[in-house]
Image (cartoon, helix red, strand yellow):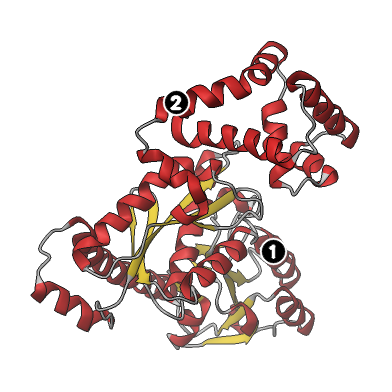
């Protein structure tokens, strides 16, 4: 969980930043000495690449081409050494690195060796991981009740600058991912994503306590009326999920528990968030928010503890049975169409795009629903009742 800026701040012997200040915040996962192609078989996203220009391996022109390819593969930065310092790095290469927002370093031939650089970067990465683990241990004890007493609370307050006389809440970040053909590469991409997320959390304005626990990120932060931290988490996850190489591959959501003032109750907030995780994809979320909470469920959250759940289920089954029978018999998706049309604000084009169907096909489905149920979908109360029945079944009985 270090960046190119941290590498630059090491002031390693003979290592100079040529350009790419805009890329100094790129996360560094490890080092990679550029040698044989294809590069993707030997490197991982976030690697800090080290390349030597000499008569045996790479010419300066080869180095330029390699820079472009490696940047596409997601390197964090590139450091080049030229044998005996015979050639200067071309201005074209420097300008291109600047355009790519890629930090480009030059290593003098008599400066630090690749081994020295790799060792220094490795030590820095391990050092930050130890610090992160220490923070995680404190939070784990706080949430699960181990060694928690007034003295322990005072210790945490002093170390992290937290004041436990105001409400705090827990957020659990769940990372969903698609798997491709290369499972090893998928795993490296996932690990790099978690490293980037770790770094973003570290630099939040109101730095929360956090830990990685059971493949999830768990945060504890002060719950303010302006929801400043919640908005920042929303922004971080939205920006991260759109980055190369994460776009279309990784999708994250933060589930929030309620806010509590007593440290002894923070574990309850965690359990509330955890209990919502299986329901997160069923929550009403027409704007695709990244941060969800029990309040996102509206009235549905009260139904989980209702004593008349069987009556609720019977009503929903009766309301939906004709549609469910039709879907089961024909392999159609009328139930999903109803919900998605509602979630998309009754926008035909947007719903059709979301469901990968033609507009005409969607309109046919809506007409079919009206025929089967013998209703008019323009009746807003009737439509809302149907959607409520679908969501209640999914949230309570799925």
Q: Name the residue at 69% across, 35% down.
A: 382
Instruction: Decide which of tag 1 and tag 2 comes sooner along the chain.
Output: 1
Residue 188 image position (x, y, % from top left): 49, 51
Q: Residue at x 41, y 45 (%)?
A: 302
Q: Mark 2 packing: few (<14 Cα in 10 Å), some, or many (20+)?
A: few
Position of residue 247 relative to residue 99, above or below, is: above
Report x, y in % for residue 272: 35, 51
* Horizontal arrangement in the rendering, residue 155 relative to residue 105 (left or right): left
Asked if residue 109 shows in the view, the reply is yes
What is the quadrant of the N terminus in the image?
bottom left
Q: Nearer the viewer, residue 161 or 176?
A: 161
The outermost residue toward the top is 329
- Mark 1 lies on a secondary structure that is helix
Q: Residue at x 71, y 69 (%)?
A: 59
Q: How many marks?
A: 2
**Can see residue 49?**
no
Q: Residue furthest right?
A: 360
> What's the CA distance linking mark 1 and mark 2?
66 Å
Q: Is residue 186 above or below residue 257?
A: above
For mark 2, give the secondary structure.
Answer: helix
Task: Please provide percent x and percent y for residue 291.
Answer: 52, 59
Tag in front: 1 or 2:
2
User: Which residue is tagged 2?
Assistant: 311
Give above or below for 242 relative to 274: below
The residue labelled by disc 1 is 66
Q: Given contact means CB atoms under 8 Å apart, are the residues at marks 1 and 2 in contact?
A: no
Q: Residue at x 51, y 82 (%)?
A: 5
Quarter where residue 349 is shown:
top right
Q: Quadrant of residue 106?
A: bottom right
Against 288, residue 180 (above or below) is: above
């Amino acid at each position: 969980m270090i960046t190119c800026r941290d590498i630059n701040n090491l002031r390693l012997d003979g290592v100079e930043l040529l350009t790419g200040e805009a890329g100094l915040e790129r996360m560094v996962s490890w080092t990679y000495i550029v040698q044989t192609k294809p590069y993707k078989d030997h490197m991982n996203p976030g690697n800090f690449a080290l390349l030597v220009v000499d008569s045996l391996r790479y010419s300066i022109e080869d180095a330029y081409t390699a820079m472009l390819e490696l940047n596409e593969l997601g390197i964090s930065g590139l450091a080049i050494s030229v044998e005996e310092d015979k050639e200067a790095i071309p201005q074209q290469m420097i300008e291109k690195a600047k355009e790519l927002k890629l930090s480009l370093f030059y290593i003098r031939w008599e400066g630090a060796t690749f081994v020295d650089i790799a060792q220094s970067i490795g030590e820095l990465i391990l050092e930050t991981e130890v610090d992160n683990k220490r923070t995680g241990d404190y939070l784990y004890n706080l949430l699960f009740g181990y060694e928690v007493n007034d003295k322990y609370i005072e210790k945490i307050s002093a170390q992290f600058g937290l004041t436990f006389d105001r409400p705090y809440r827990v957020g659990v970040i769940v990372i969903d991912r698609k798997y491709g053909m290369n499972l090893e590469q998928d795993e490296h991409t996932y690990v790099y994503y978690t490293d980037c997320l770790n770094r973003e959390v570290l630099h939040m304005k109101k730095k929360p306590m956090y830990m990685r626990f059971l493949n999830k990120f768990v945060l504890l932060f002060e719950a303010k009326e302006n929801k400043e931290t919640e908005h920042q988490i929303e922004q971080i996850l939205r920006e991260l999920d759109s980055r190369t190489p994460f776009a279309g591959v990784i999708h994250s959501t933060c589930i929030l528990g309620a806010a509590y003032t007593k440290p002894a109750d923070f574990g309850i907030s965690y359990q509330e968030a955890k209990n919502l995780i299986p329901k997160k994809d069923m929550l009403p979320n027409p704007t695709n928010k990244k941060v969800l909470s029990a309040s996102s469920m509206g009235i549905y959250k009260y139904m989980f503890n209702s004593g008349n759940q069987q009556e609720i289920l019977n009503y929903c089954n009766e309301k939906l049975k004709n549609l469910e029978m039709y879907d089961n018999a024909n392999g159609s998706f009328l139930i999903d169409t109803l919900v998605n049309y509602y979630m998309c604000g009754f926008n035909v084009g947007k719903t059709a795009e979301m469901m990968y169907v033609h507009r005409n096909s969607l309109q046919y489905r809506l007409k079919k629903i009206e025929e089967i149920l013998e209703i008019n979908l323009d009746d807003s109360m009737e439509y809302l009742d149907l959607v409520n029945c679908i969501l209640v079944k999914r949230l309570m009985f799925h």
